Amino acid sequence: MSKYLLSTYATGGAVAEMTMAPEDMQAFMQRVATLEAEMDKRGTFVFGGQLHGPDASTVVRGTDADRVMTDGPFVEAKEHIAGFYIIEAADLDEALSWAGKVVDAIGQPIEVRPFAAAGRVEM
């Protein structure tokens, strides 16, 4: 099994800042809960989460002697990562199938990216 990152992007604020009628938000949350329950049941779900908007980010640059921190996203762009899932799948085709289910649940495009190596890099 390989690990994959399924990331969703948004424009403007994060998903939580979307203006939805309460019944639409409830339906949205139910679709996400159903999807995550299916991922759990099949042993696919590793971790996932929704992120705050890009205005909540801090970028850290430099070396120990010259550390600089700035507010805001690393890249100025209209789109930003809004949330993600880390899943385990047998292959890319299975990961893409799960990505399709995420698209169905949240109605946003999903980028699928495999992890380069399992575990931590040893020095």
Image (tube, rainbow, N blue to C red):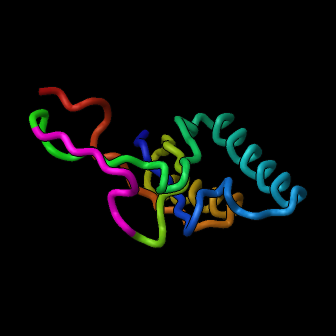
Rendered residue at 53%/36% (across/down): 47
Q: Is residue 47 magenta?
A: no
| Residue 77: x %, y % from top left | 41, 70
Residue at image point 43% right, 39% down? 1
Residue 90: x percent and y percent? Answer: 46, 45
Q: Which residues are magenta?
A: 66-76
In-image side of 61 versus 81 (left or right): left
Name the residue located 68 percent from the left edge and 53 percent from the top edge: 16
Q: State left or right for residue 68 relative to residue 59.
A: left
Quarter of image, res 120: top left
User: In the image as oriented, which residue stretches furthest toward the right?
Assistant: 23
Left or right: 59 with respect to 2?
Answer: left
- Is 75 within the magenta? yes
82 or 60, which lies in front?
A: 60
Looking at the image, residue 14 lies above or below residue 88 = below
Residue 27: give x, y in percent of width and height.
84, 55
- The residue positioned 86% from the left and 62% from the top of the image is 21
